[in-house]
């Protein structure tokens, strides 16, 4: 199936970790950006992850009532239909969800998938993220335990963020400072609370200086080698080699060496949003500037329908974003690794 079953998603993550590559996790906000992501994966012959943030889901739910669950469910159902036309496998994921939005986003989506599984169906989403980085670690992990149990029962993988990622995304922001580095003690406490797979599988978004958005060189100090310390520190305590499946947040603008080091140390998923947003919008801006007298009814003229038709500039946007996804697959070594 083009949309991964729980078993296939686990296989995807296992293959990535063993092969030291990662799946691009592409944030989408519309059916068109969904197609762009699917197209990019197909052109790279890579499986991948499609994800929807709270803001993206609210946008997808329509501006009349801005319902996040409606938006997320609608896009997931649409993806289950159209992904069948692409010769790759993708998992559906929900991105950053802070504490104040759990009841309006992740918890209802978990309930929907639990109902599906009870009927013998697969879950609607394959993974959900709980972002407790704004909470104390104790509160973060307590909520993580509750969500992990519900996710495991619905055959869903949970993603947790235990320490802050800098910058801002969907209203969740953190300063860029020394708190952006997860310690071995943080990782040990996570393993104590959530286990290492026996309570349900989870992905760990540890912090190694990550920042959402794009910054000029020198403004962000990434230390992906820190992930090796976390693997070894927890691995030695529990007698398990490379116990964590890591997620790379704030990856836009990272160097090839930083990405390579992260992959060597257990990163299996890397989020892309800022770069793909720009890739989608850039050709639209170019089209509007070049055809301003066609897309606008200037000086009482009638314009040119073929230039302001959304399909005209929409096709350019899709192709550009797909090209950026292909680049991401190359950067993350997932090109040519599709299951089929």
Image (cartoon, rainbow, N blue to C red):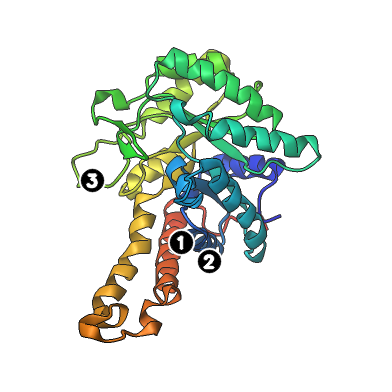
Q: Which residue is mark 2?
A: 43
Distance, label 2 to label 1, CA atoms, is 7 Å
**Residue 279 appears in which quarter of the rendering?**
bottom left
**Residue 154 appears in which quarter of the rendering?**
top right
Q: Please tell me how crowded label 1 is: few (under 14), some (14-19), or many (20+) other residues with Cα within 10 Å.
A: many
User: Which residue is nearer to you in this view: 278 or 335?
Assistant: 278
**Could you tell whether 28 is left or right of 42 in the image?**
left
Q: Which residue is mark 1?
A: 326
Residue 130 location in percent, x, y?
Answer: 50, 30
**Element type at marker 2?**
helix
Residue sitting at the far right:
120
Q: Of label 3 and label 2, which has the lower sequence position? A: 2
Residue 33 location in percent, x, y?
Answer: 47, 59
Q: Quadrant of the C terminus?
A: bottom right
- Residues at circles 2 and 1 in contact by the CB criterion of under 8 Å: yes
**Could you tell whether 145 is left or right of 280 in the image?**
right
Q: Which residue is mark 3?
A: 215
**Element type at marker 3?**
loop
């Amino acid at each position: 199936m083009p949309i991964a079953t729980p078993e296939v998603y686990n296989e995807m993550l296992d293959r990535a970790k063993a092969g030291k590559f990662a799946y691009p996790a592409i944030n989408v906000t519309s059916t068109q950006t969904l197609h762009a992501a699917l197209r990019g994966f197909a052109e790279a012959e890579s499986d991948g992850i499609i994800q929807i943030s709270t803001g993206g889901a609210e946008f997808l739910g329509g501006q009349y009532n801005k319902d996040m669950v409606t938006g997320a469910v609608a896009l997931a159902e649409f993806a289950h239909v159209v992904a069948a036309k692409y010769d790759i496998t993708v998992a559906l994921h929900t991105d950053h969800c802070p504490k104040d939005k759990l009841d309006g986003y992740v918890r209802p989506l978990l309930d929907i998938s639990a109902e599906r599984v009870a009927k013998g169906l697969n879950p609607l989403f394959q993974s959900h993220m709980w972002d407790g980085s704004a909470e104390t670690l104790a509160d973060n992990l307590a909520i993580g335990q509750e969500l992990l149990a519900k996710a495991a029962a619905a055959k869903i993988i949970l993603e947790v963020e235990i320490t802050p990622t800098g910058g801002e995304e969907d209203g969740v922001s953190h300063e860029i400072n020394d708190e952006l580095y997860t310690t071995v003690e943080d990782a040990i406490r996570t393993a104590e609370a959530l286990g290492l797979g026996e309570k349900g599988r989870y992905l760990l978004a540890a912090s190694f200086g990550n920042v959402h958005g794009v910054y000029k060189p020198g403004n962000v100090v990434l230390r992906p080698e820190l992930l090796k310390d976390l693997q070894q520190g927890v691995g030695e305590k529990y007698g398990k080699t490379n116990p964590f499946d890591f997620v790379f947040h704030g990856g836009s603008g990272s160097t090839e060496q930083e990405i390579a080091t992260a992959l060597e140390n257990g990163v299996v998923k890397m989020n892309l949003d800022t770069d793909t947003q720009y890739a989608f919008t850039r050709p639209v801006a170019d089209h509007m500037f070049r055809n301003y007298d066609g897309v606008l009814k200037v000086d009482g003229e009638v314009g040119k329908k073929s230039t302001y038709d959304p399909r005209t500039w929409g096709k350019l946007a899709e192709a550009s974003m797909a090209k950026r996804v292909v680049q991401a697959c190359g950067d993350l070594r997932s090109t040519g690794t599709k299951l089929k």
